[in-house]
Amino acid sequence: MELSELKDKKVLVVGLAKTGVALARFLVKYGAQVTISDHKSEAELAYYLEQVEDLPLQLELEGHSPKSFLNKDYVVLSPGIPSHLKLFEYIKMQGVEVTGEFEFCSRFIKEPLLVVTGTNGKTTTSDLIYQALQESGKKVCAGGNFGQPLSEYLYTGEKADFLVVEASSFMLEHVKQMTPQNIIFTNLAEDHLDRYRSMEEYVNAKRKIFKNVSDQTTVILNADDRAILELARDPSVQKGCLRYFSRKKSLESQIMKIGGAILIGNQIRVRIGPEIEYYSIENNKLKGGHSYENIMAAILTARINGANWESIQKVISAYTGRSHRLSYVRKVGGVRFYNDSKATNIHSVMKALDVFEDNVILIMGGKDTGLNYKPLAERIQRKVKNLILVGEAKEKINRQIGDYSETFVIGTFEEAVLIAHQKSRIGDTVLLSPGYPSFDIFNSYEERGEVFENMVNQFY
């Protein structure tokens, strides 16, 4: 589609948050007639309403009226809006296209899309790709969950060589035409069961990323993840140029034959052409074996898209990770404090605990997403000295795994951090790895992590 085709189109945007604001500004700029619908009140949306008050648009707040959705050319959902609501099914039956911001905006983007998805590791992988390409002199923009909404990129009129897009399952639910140049799939585990009725439904949302794979698509997959290998058997995936990465030395000959990346000791071996390249991770500053998976996926993607060896090596040697992702805060009285506020599912908590041997004081809890945390029991019993529980899901966690450690169920987040500090002794590690989203108490995992770090920085 061309941007000129938006003129006089009637578009209803559902959800007025960061993405809704960007989408509204983009649509108005190119002449669309825009209505915004949100179930929240004017007071709750005051911050975002200020950002669109200069735009000629209509507002529908405190609920969604089916009537306002009719006679529209498009209904475009922000990522946080579930696509399976009965209202949207009714609208589709009336002939109105219901789609998501990611799918809708991708139709207007001509630049190559390098799309990173998976349950965990998406942001780190996206960031490494972004930095490696940028260090190599490419003009790169970051989009999706990592960076700006695609609608903001379109609004600014920027022209990048590549767009590195971190895509959640929420963003992929609506994929019909979106065609990435690269698909990078980090791993696949249970997540978001508050939004999806089953693990199968969650996987099916992720699977949509492969809808338009062709021989022009490079698909980069984790060979150590059984669920991803199962997805790779699908005929639609097999249409692409497949590349794998692995930490298993036993797969070296197989991966080097078809092209990919393998971890051998302190070295990552990569082959995308006739020669094997070698990257040192001896000075790697990221913690956890899963970090090597993210690094391998990023090296492959960056190299395939023209980044040079020197730039990639420089980036992976210097990279310290993004905030709130198993990031070291400080050492107080012989106790180390780590902020892993980004950990919002069981898989990410497992990976965090795997970094440490024992004597961990673990702070968990947040908005209940319907996940089963019993598989954490063995790690809790073996590594966790004290389990500090807080938030909406605290009682559920306590029932599932509270018996495997000395457990404290706490009223507020601040109290939880103070208790963790009080219980700690020299040699212990206090780890904030909640396993749940933050929305029961905080606006984002960033805010949760910042509160944690601010409190830790006041300890003495």
Image (spheres, rainbow, N blue to C red):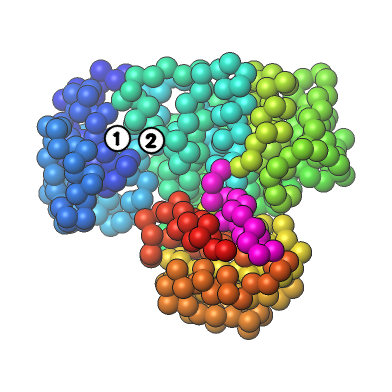
Which of the pair 342/370 is nearer the observer?
A: 342
Label 2 sits on what residue type? Pro
Q: Residues within 10 Å of mark 1 (few under 14, many from 20)?
A: many
Identified at 61% across, 55% down, the residue is: 330
- Residue 71 on the magenta span: no
Quarter the C terminus occupies: bottom right
Number of numbered discs present? 2
Identified at 83% across, 24% down, the residue is: 276
Q: Is label 2 in contact with label 1 (beta carbons under 8 Å)?
A: yes
- Answer left or right for 272 relative to 414: right
Measure the C-alpha gap from mark 2 to mark 1.
7 Å
Residue on which the image places disc 1? 22
Asked if 411 appears above or below 357 in the picture, the reply is below
Q: Which mark is residue 318?
A: none
The x, y position of residue 140, in whole percent, is 51, 23
Q: Give the magenta range.
A: 322-339
The secondary structure that dominates the magenta segment is: strand
Secondary structure, mark 2, is loop
Residue on which the image places disc 2? 149
Residue 302 quadrant: top right
Is residue 194 visible in the rendered structure shown here?
A: yes
Asked if 296 appears above or below 387 in the picture, the reply is above
Which of the pair 429/127 is nearer the observer?
A: 429
Residue 412 quadrant: bottom left
Secondary structure, mark 1, is helix
- Answer left or right for 358 relative to 38: right
Residue 87 quadrant: bottom left
Is residue 372 visible in the rendered structure shown here?
A: no
Identified at 47% across, 48% down, the residue is: 169
The x, y position of residue 99, in whole percent, is 33, 40
